[in-house]
Amino acid sequence: DDVKSLRAVISPDISRIRNIGIMAHIDAGKTTTTERMLYYSGYTRALGDVDDGDTVTDFMAQERERGITIQSAAVTFDWKSYRINLIDTPGHVDFTLEVERALRVLDGAVAVFDASAGVEAQTLTVWRQAEKHHVPCVCFLNKMDKPTANFSLSVESIRWKLKANPVLLQIPVGSGKNFLGVVDLVTNQKLLWKQGSLRDDGRMFDSSLMDQTDEAKLVKEVKRARMALIEQVADLDDEFAELLLTDFSDNFDAVPSSKLQEAVRRVTLARKGVPVLCGSSLRNKGVQPLLDAITAYLPAPDERHHDLVRWYQDDLCALAFKVVHDKQRGPLVFLRIYSGCLKPQTAVHNINRNSTERMSRLLVPFADQHVEIPSMTAGNIALTVGLKQTVTGDTIVSSKASAAAAARRAHSDGVAAKKRGELTSVVLSGVEVPDPVFFCTIEPPTMAKQKILKMPSSCLQREDPSLKVRVDRDSVQLEMRHIVTKELAVAPMDITSAGGVCEFAFTEEMEGLLLAEVKEAVENGVHSSYLQGPVLGYPLMGVSSLIRNVRTEPGTSPAMVSACVSRCMTKALRLAGGQILEPMMSLEVTVEEEHLSVVLGDLAQRRGTVRDIQSRHNNKVLLANVPLAEMMGYSTILRTLTSGNATFSLELDTYEAMNPQDQNTLLKRMSGLL
């Protein structure tokens, strides 16, 4: 029962490493499952609880306050003779990038389901992400202790909603409050957790072979389920089918459990089926068999084939998949090592940045507590200190010479590849970063604070590659735009005068440097007036200017020219009138049919226009155009309206004129803010 020390961790053989992620819809129990894994493997003293805010992987103040996972957290621990590098990922659609960059470097995943709900909206999203990266999965039907838990319906939802092939390795013993444990169909063992006090940690459980003394109904159900498992695996794996037909044709049930387990592993790695287990993490039941399934069925790093790695042979090749900022250590870079060995106090080469940096320290990640180690080998996930230029998606190698040698090997292989129409590269494919869908402006209270704001913004961009930051003094005006609806007909004027309306142009006699300075000053003034706009500072769209017949008096500075032009143009634009445009977003909502009407009603209140309603599998896909101003906080509202059973995507479509009523309402609201 002693708590294990991370300092005793040594690099195991690569075949004993499992790099996995925990993924699911929000509130399915990912973090609780992770906490139980850490406790049963001996790396924590107490069972952490999300509601109590004392979990290992949800260590941010915001995560503990809200009871949700915001950022992915990596932990390393041992289970029996295996090393498990585990990443707990968020379940909110808002933090989908965290799931994306975790799955990019993982070899397997555990998909956690609420047994009372089955496949939910975000489950579909993370499942598609796992499929995109060809990550083998194991399914865990959690919360079997809930009164509404339904094992068979959850399995069917995996089959129909995820279009997957569930391979049942367990069946539950009891359900709801009477959920006692599971029967392992591979080994034919019954695993029961006794009903104890609330303080029962679930470490001890009874394990026994099924026999005829057990309940007749359970015996019959287990026999039927095990036979169905054997037949299903035989259909999916030719080697196992041949074994059955040659050695066990008289009695399929006599096949050794080890042979069945090997076949299930082959099926899982080939992604022909997904093993399904069940339990209740909160009630401390079923987590130890899940750990056994992770080591038994999910792949080791050397079983995932990365063609690029063979060109580096034994040289270092790693991918930076996450960057976090530490107040004491500076930027911490998470690396997945694909080949070679990583050591501290050594220089490494960043191919993407074409730069060489010195890595000062090497750490084993354990949530927010890290342990320094002398080296780390291929197949592991490492945390490095000192890489100040590296960002998410960069490929790290030992040296330029190593990259050049890999490039030569890739080129020689590329001769054959080109014949097949393939491309060769010595750079690992980075993390796909979704485009931003929400924009806001941050303005320091004083100019003195401007420099202070620059540092955290640069740190945030390194941590979150989906964050785009640009400096623009007029960015507060980018939410709305203004378009002139009348053609300006104005006369020439003296640029030094304080008023009037004019059309600017250059005379032929203005030449040389003076012409260049004046022309640039006039263009800056015109551009400034367009950005500031004549109504509440909204920038102008679709306006072009013709510059001619400009006269300046000797001694007039370019700054004065620019200021006068901007002032005159603003007056002219106000006289020209105009129409305020607002950005329109193209919205796609995937929702179950029973929630379609309430979503349609909500969109009507948001001034949305429905373009089409399509069918996709058992869901409805709603296509609409909605003003951006009406979409603030829509993800939260949609989850509330549909009980979490909907997903949506949003992108800029066009700018459209606002009707007078909406325009007046908006102008009053903006005037009050200004």
Image (spheres, helix red, strand yellow):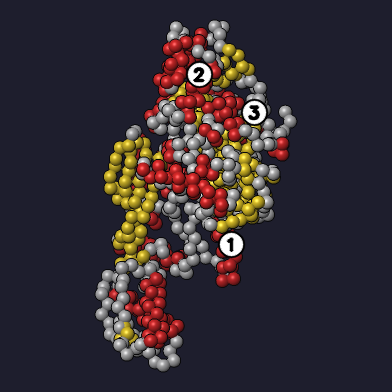
Q: Between residues 648 and 662, which one lies in front from this camera angle? A: 648
Task: Tell me the SS state at disc 2.
Answer: helix
The residue under label 1 is: 455
The residue shown at (63%, 49%) is 384
- Rounded to the nearest angstrom, the CA distance separating label 3 from label 1 is 44 Å
Disc 1 marks which amino acid? Met
Task: Tell me the SS state at disc 3.
Answer: loop
Whether the residues at callouts 3 and 2 have beta carbons within 8 Å, the answer is no
The residue under label 3 is: 81
Question: x%, y% of residue 557?
Answer: 45, 87
Whether the residues at callouts 2 and 1 have beta carbons within 8 Å, the answer is no
Question: x%, y% of residue 619?
Answer: 34, 36
Whether the residues at callouts 3 and 1 have beta carbons within 8 Å, the answer is no
Task: Tell me the SS state at disc 1.
Answer: helix
Query: Where is residue 643, by image quadrant?
Result: top left
Q: Earlier in the sequence, mark 3 or mark 2?
A: 3
Q: Is residue 49 above or below residue 280?
A: below
- Crowding at label 3, few (<14), some or many (≥20) Cα neighbours within 10 Å? few
- Rounded to the nearest angstrom, the CA distance separating label 3 from label 2 is 21 Å
Disc 2 marks which amino acid? Leu
Q: Between residues 362 and 548, which one lies in front from this camera angle? A: 362
- Rounded to the nearest angstrom, the CA distance separating label 2 from label 1 is 57 Å
Question: x%, y% of residue 396?
Answer: 56, 49
Q: Is residue 346 above or below residue 512?
A: above
Q: Earlier in the sequence, mark 2 or mark 1?
A: 2
Left/right placement of residue 544 relative to residue 11 reads left
The residue under label 2 is: 260
Q: Between residues 570 and 372, which one lies in front from this camera angle? A: 372
